[in-house]
Image: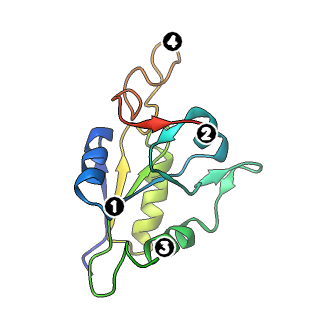
């Protein structure tokens, strides 16, 4: 198995990887409320890193991601696992979650820089400086 290393992509690069590698999986690690009400990339799987009601790190995060990746098609025996792409609001939580996955031995983990909404602008608004929505990539909300 190749050495694990956390890699970084801008949202457009993450989208391109998802289009070119059908086994790649995009995991939205934000809270349930963010995922449902702020919106999320089309096709993203929700596995929260930190979630309500206590806002503690999900003690089962790595286990849940590994279960997803070992589910058959995504990670086959004797072959390289598919890329895991993590997205959060601005790329900070997904950086921490990505480090946990790399430490657990997943070989292809990507952090989406700028996340779904990007950093705050001078008016304290998101989605105006960067992020998945700013780049007009496919997203939906409930």
For marks 1 and 2, give the one nearer the viewer. Answer: 1
Please name the residue that numbered disc 3 is placed on: 66
Give the Cα distance between marks 3 and 4: 39 Å
Q: Which dot marks residue 24?
A: 1
Apparent side of residue 42 relative to residue 63 in the rendered image (left or right):
left
Please name the residue that numbered disc 4 is placed on: 123
Q: Are marks 1 and 2 in contact (CB under 8 Å)?
A: no
Q: Are marks 4 and 2 in contact (CB under 8 Å)?
A: no
- Label 1 sits on a secondary structure element that is loop
Residue 24 x/y as whole percent: 33, 61
Who comes first in sequence, dot 4 or dot 2?
2
Q: Are marks 3 and 4 in contact (CB under 8 Å)?
A: no
Who comes first in sequence, dot 1 or dot 2?
1
Who comes first in sequence, dot 4 or dot 1?
1
Residue 68 x/y as whole percent: 49, 70
Give the Cα distance between marks 4 and 1: 36 Å
For marks 3 and 4, give the one nearer the viewer. Answer: 3
Quarter residue 60 falls in: bottom right
Residue 4 x/y as whole percent: 31, 70
For image coordinates 41% across by 30% down, the residue present is: 133
For image coordinates 77% across by 49% down, the residue present is: 53
Give the Cα distance between marks 4 and 2: 21 Å
User: Few, some or many C-alpha atoms within 10 Å of disc 3 (few <14, some 14-19, many ≥20)?
Assistant: some
- Label 3 sits on a secondary structure element that is helix
Whether 85 is drawn above or below 129: the answer is below
Apparent side of residue 122 relative to residue 107 in the rendered image (left or right):
right
Residue at the bottom extreme, as displayed: 78
Who comes first in sequence, dot 3 or dot 2?
2
Quadrant showing the N terminus: bottom left
User: Few, some or many C-alpha atoms within 10 Å of disc 2 (few <14, some 14-19, many ≥20)?
Assistant: some
Please name the residue that numbered disc 2 is placed on: 34
């Amino acid at each position: 198995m190749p050495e694990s290393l956390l890699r970084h992509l801008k949202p457009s690069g993450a989208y391109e990887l998802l289009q070119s590698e059908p086994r790649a999986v995009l995991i939205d690690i934000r809270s349930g409320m963010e995922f449902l009400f702020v919106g999320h990339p089309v096709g993203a799987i929700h596995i929260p890193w930190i979630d309500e009601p206590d806002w503690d790190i999900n003690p089962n995060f790595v286990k849940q991601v590994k279960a997803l990746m070992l589910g058959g098609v995504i990670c086959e025996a004797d072959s390289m696992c598919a890329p895991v792409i993590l997205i959060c609001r601005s790329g900070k939580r997904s950086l921490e979650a990505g480090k946990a996955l790399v430490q657990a031995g997943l070989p292809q983990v990507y952090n989406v820089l700028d996340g779904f909404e990007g950093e705050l602008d001078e008016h304290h608004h998101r989605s105006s400086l960067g992020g998945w929505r700013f780049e007009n990539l496919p997203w939906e909300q409930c």
